[in-house]
Image (cartoon, helix red, strand yellow):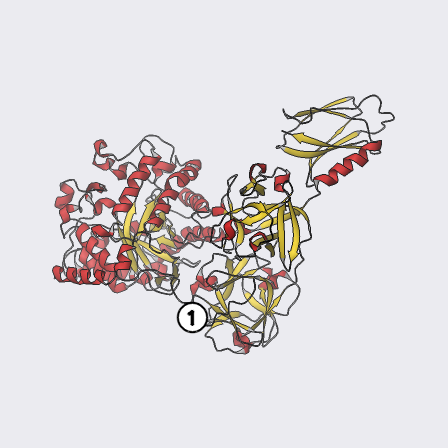
Amino acid sequence: MKLFRLLILILTLNLLPTMVSAWPGMELPPLHVDGRYLKDPCGNNVLLHGVAITPSPWFNGCMYGNEHCRWENYDVQGCLDYNFAIINRLTDTSDGWYLNYIRLHIDPYWTNDPGPPISEHDISRFNFNRLVQYTDEVIIPLINHAHSRGLYVVLRPPGVCPERISVGDAYQQYLITVWDFLSQHPQIRNADHVMFEIANEPVEILGTNGVWGGTSQAHFDALVNYFQPIVDLIRNNGANNICWIPGTGWQSHYAGYANNPITGGNIGYAVHIYPGYWGGIRNYQDFLNGWNVNVKPVADIAPIIITETDWAPQSYKDAGHYVWGIGNTGVAGGQGFGANLKYIVDQSGNVSWNVLAPENLIHMGDPNGSTAYNNDWEAVAAPVKQWFSEYAADNIPTSNCEPTAGCSGNVQNGIYTISAKHSNKCLDVYNFSMSDGGNIVQWSCGNTENQQWLIEQNSEGYYTIRSLYSDKCLDVANWSTNDGANIQQWTCNGQEVQQFCLQSTGDGYYTIVNRNSGKCIDITDFSMDDGANVQQWTCYNNDCQQFALTLVNTQAIANGTYSIQNRNSGQALDSYNLGTSDGTNVVQWPGTGQTNQQWNITHVENDFYRISPVHAPSKALDVIDYSSADGANVQLWEYWGGTCQQWRFIDVGNGYFQIEARHSGKLLEVAEASLANGANVQQWPANNHHCQHWMLSSLRSASVFENEVASENETALEVQVFPNPVTDGNVTIVLPETNKDISNDIVINIMSLQGSTVYSTNSCRTHSIDIPLNLIQGMYILEITDGERRYVQKLIIK
């Protein structure tokens, strides 16, 4: 029978050469939860199969003795080299390995202060700064390497739950601290291939009835009170990553969640199963009974992921092989654990699963080792290797689905009101809500930002529709595909549930079709009333499903000199190192007030402008080589009038603009949403991230100040200022005796070239005044006045 299955597999793989050769690095589209299934952007059900990875010396060889340690002593590069090699081996399809996800543990080895060994649930030595440091140095590189090998990542927080937890305890606060940081990390939040497992192996909880335990409804209600605030925090941080929720009993009990589930969208449940669970499940009937009582109630309403399992006969544990669960593969429907695990989860149809560790698959976790347990079919490695390769012929996630037929794609990016044809009333964020889940209704049209929407097209022809008032996007609640599902606002995440086709009806109106569901935005019950709810419904082209898009007249950018500041980082657009030659790179840098951060914006034609640095006025912002590619670099180049040097400003509200290249339709952004000094500036398709938002601040130019200096000082106070330039942070101001009739105190102001005051002091009528300054390098304006006369001079800080 096994030989027959293997022959079928070989024939199947021969028919799928492209899939086989591309497994490492193949597409990893964002997944979402729809009902009881994990789905890709095209609505296909997805199942994942993989292994857990724990980057710590103990789990990377030291468990076998010090001579087997792959690395130690906080050797970051050694850790990465070993775990990269493990990932490479277990995605090597030429060797028969077909995995498409890892469960990645942020081991306390990295996040605790060093010291004697302590239990994994002991958080007394947790150091937040180490979490920050080693997330960047260890976890992010592993996440990125997994992506390069075609692997999704389920991220697990450091350590395990104490045996007993209770709402409001120290461990809950610890999890809140950890997830608050991780869910805001720019390389983790809403990363297409990263999911969150909220905690590991709670055992008992103090129930809402005041009794410790793990299986009554009072205990599940307490679990909701424990984990719901963590999920709410994650969602409030703008992270829509799938969250996998643990149960009690070392992640074996889930039944009560069916009556009181965790909410927030994109929710599933993370289960552990070993042969000793539920009183022993080493045959089909016991396994099925345990599953039906403990897991099936939530598997009927949400996807399941088994993040720990393994098995092998006792003889392998006795011989020193790594195994946690004692059992054998056996036969589906009869005796044994492994075959019945596969049979039951396959019958459920919505269960992803991974084995406990690389040692369950390759001998001693050696990247060059043989299949574990001597390739014995009765232990976990051999059957899993075959089963995962069989799974690889199906349930492969993709985003290669055709757009909804008839997407017009001809609506210009801009700010619009959206009014229903039947009622002539506008889509409105109800009650000026700023919250995720804020409701969308129709209301009599008025000139208010909660009825104004920024509509932007992506590279596939779909549009996002973002409230100018709340900065959140139109969204179908809970990724639903049902008629009547609510239309709400939610933090913009670029996923299909927030993408719409705008289909022209040919008479100036549009239907608005959700990409995820294929259904139309609809005014409930054809209502004419203010406050009527907005929902999705099967498209019938009724007047309550047709909308006029009216472009809002926004104030044009006046010709002038501006600083341009990035919303995400707060840093200024900067011509690197005051460069003036063609090809000078454009970066972000903390504001200095210097002329390489001052930009002359000049109207060219229609909605487009030239942007030139004050220090090199013949140059202009330019997209390298006239490129339309994502990530094409932005530089300075002699202005020649090309459309790669012309830019449109799109008002996104709150004083910010997107800056769109005319030739490509792509936006000026800070690469990878970096916060670093000197981070590169490039073009990229609109994605609603704040790294694509820029604030323009009108400046008084240096020449204005120079003219002011000349005129003001003709009858000014006599003042001596030294040294100028200032080199050591201290400046002395001397008022010679020739100044007569000073009857008032002296006021000293220092202003930036933007006109803002950066230093101010009052001084008595004193001959000499010493002023310690703490200003960054650049040019400033010094003003000294006695209320009647005024002295103005440029002050240089070096």
Residue 160, picture quadrant? top left
Q: Nearer the viewer, residue 303 or 87?
A: 87
Looking at the figure, which quarter contains the N terminus?
bottom left
> Where is residue 241 shown, x and y percent of the image?
41, 54
> Where is residue 121 shown, x and y percent of the image?
34, 40
Query: To which residue does mark 1 refer?
Result: 482
Say left or right for 407 vs 693: left
> Where is residue 88 shown, x and y percent of the image?
28, 46
Instruction: Report whether residue 208 is seen.
Output: no
Looking at the figure, which quarter contains the C terminus?
top right
Say left or right for 38 vs 771: left
- Say which amino acid is labelled 1: Asn
Could you tell me how many numbered marks the image carries? 1
User: Is residue 767 shown above or below 289?
Assistant: above
> Where is residue 557 shown, x and y percent of the image?
66, 54
Q: Nearer the viewer, residue 45 or 25?
A: 25
Instruction: Report whether residue 704 is seen.
Output: yes
The residue depicted at 45 percent of the width and 52 percent of the height is 239
